């Protein structure tokens, strides 16, 4: 093949393909059927090539491992505990001030309420997903057992599967209660934020004081449920850790 | 007559073969389930989140600012829904938990709009309420996008 300067030369593999195509064409012409149906072999060839093109290789499972899922969930729970505790501390700081409460203390409280809404997003989404999917959530989670690389962990997870499922059922119940308490907790915080931003002197009025009490109670209820979730996750972690599972049995 | 019937048979065979090709590549009446379609749909979600984040930086006080944020957020939801339609059965099964969380995340972010309206009704300053809404939307959408990126990476979206 003569290469004209400046003209792009096709790579050898393309040339090979062209040659192969000619050979295939020749083979097809050998089996030419009756006159009037010359297009049929080409049609079959094209269809075959298209069908082959659609065949795809399923990639290997890339689901997160069961163990890392538990660790990640525990981390999320720790983060939520910190955020709720910080908000309750901020609430206490406002109510412990003499009236009118200094604006910077109220501003810090408002910022904390805003931060809580942001920081709680992932754990709330996780809790809702667990409630919506129910048993299917655990089923999908436990399907990732197969992808666990360490055979000792895989064996531990398989051995403790019923106990892990029991933990999950309790986590689901805790998540439901946490979500139910979080809603009025956040609503109370936001109402107090509006009232206090409008009138810093209203911190000590009776209606707001009552709202502070109920909001605090809901906050503590959220903390309690989150601690229960953390305990269950710790139990799960202990079960799937090979050394501990051996000593337990 | 015989030639005609053979030709018809060929045509039926060919049609069946092509139908198989197309049915394997897309869901009935939905977008195609191909790596390219997934990449495009994912890029659309990311763009919409960027648009939303830009809107939170430039939102003006008043009903126009709120309406614009709402519209941008609904576009994110729409783009995300479109993206989920491009996932194949393996990705839908394997990523069911992550997808449910992403869906719930959008629902939680949307609550910020009703919280904003409640705050206005309770007498909050429209300027500070909108500032609050913008801040929450910007940060929450950033976290949500991180989650989306992490989930799509695990599911090898667009990777074929």
Image (spheres, helix red, strand yellow):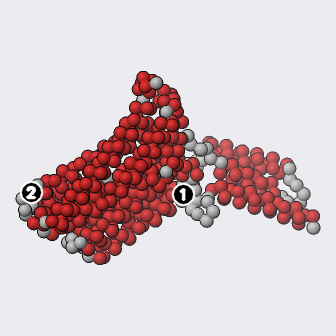
Q: Where does the image place residue B96, in percent across and percent down from the top left?
A: 50, 51
Q: Where does the image place residue B16, in percent across and percent down from the top left?
A: 75, 59
Residue highlighted by disc 2: A97
The chain identifier of the residue carrying mark 2 reads A
Residue B65 shows in this picture:
yes
Q: How busy is the neighbourhood of tag 1: few (under 14 within 10 Å), some, or many (20 plus)?
A: many
Q: Residue at x 39, y 57 (%)?
A: B105
Q: Going by the picture, which residue comes out furthest to the top?
A: A247
Distance CA(mark 2)–CA(mark 1): 55 Å
Assign the N terminus of chain A to one quadrant of the image.
top right
| Label drawn at residue B86 | 1
* Residue nearest the observer in this picture, A27 or B50: B50
Q: Which residue is drawn at 58% across and 63% down?
A: B30
The secondary element bearing badge 2 is classed as loop
The secondary element bearing badge 1 is classed as loop
Look at the numbered discs 2 and 1 and tell me whether their residues touch, using CB distance below 8 Å: no
Q: Is A151 positioned to the left or the right of B122 in the image?
A: right
């Amino acid at each position: 093949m003569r290469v004209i300067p400046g003209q792009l030369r096709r790579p050898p593999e393309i040339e090979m393909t062209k040659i192969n195509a000619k050979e295939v064409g020749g083979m097809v012409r050998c089996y030419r059927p009756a006159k009037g149906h010359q297009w049929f072999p080409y049609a079959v060839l094209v269809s075959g090539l298209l069908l082959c093109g659609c065949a795809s290789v399923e990639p290997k499972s890339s689901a997160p491992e069961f163990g890392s899922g538990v660790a990640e969930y525990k981390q999320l729970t720790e983060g939520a505990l910190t955020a709720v505790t910080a908000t309750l501390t901020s609430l206490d700081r406002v109510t412990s001030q003499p009236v009118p409460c200094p604006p910077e203390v109220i501003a810090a409280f408002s910022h904390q309420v805003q931060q809580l809404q942001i920081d709680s997003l992932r754990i709330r989404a996780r809790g809702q997903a667990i409630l919506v999917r129910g048993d299917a959530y655990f089923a999908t989670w436990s399907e990732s057992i197969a992808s666990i690389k360490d055979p000792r962990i895989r064996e531990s997870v398989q051995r403790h599967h019923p106990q892990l499922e029991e933990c999950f059922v309790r986590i689901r119940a805790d998540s439901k209660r946490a979500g139910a308490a979080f809603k009025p907790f956040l609503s109370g915080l936001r109402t107090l934020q509006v009232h206090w931003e409008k009138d810093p002197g209203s911190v000590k009025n009776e209606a707001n004081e009552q709202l502070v009490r109920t909001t605090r109670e809901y906050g503590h209820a959220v903390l309690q449920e989150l601690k229960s979730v953390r305990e269950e996750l710790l139990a799960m972690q202990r079960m799937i850790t090979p050394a501990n599972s051996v000593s337990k049995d | 007559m015989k030639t005609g019937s053979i030709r018809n048979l060929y045509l039926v065979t060919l049609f069946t073969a092509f139908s198989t090709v197309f049915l394997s590549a897309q869901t009935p009446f939905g977008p195609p389930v191909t790596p390219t379609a997934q990449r495009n749909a994912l890029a659309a979600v990311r763009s919409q989140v960027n648009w939303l984040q830009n809107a939170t930086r430039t939102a003006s006080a008043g009903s126009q600012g709120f309406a614009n944020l709402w519209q941008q957020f609904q576009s994110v939801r729409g783009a995300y829904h479109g993206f989920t339609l491009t996932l194949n059965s393996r990705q839908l099964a394997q990523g069911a938990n992550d997808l449910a969380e992403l869906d719930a995340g959008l629902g939680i972010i949307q609550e910020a709009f009703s919280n904003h309206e409640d705050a206005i009704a309770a007498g909050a300053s429209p300027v500070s309420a909108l500032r609050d809404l913008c801040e929450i939307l910007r940060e929450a959408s950033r976290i949500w996008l991180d989650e989306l990126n992490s989930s799509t990476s695990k599911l090898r979206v667009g990777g074929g």
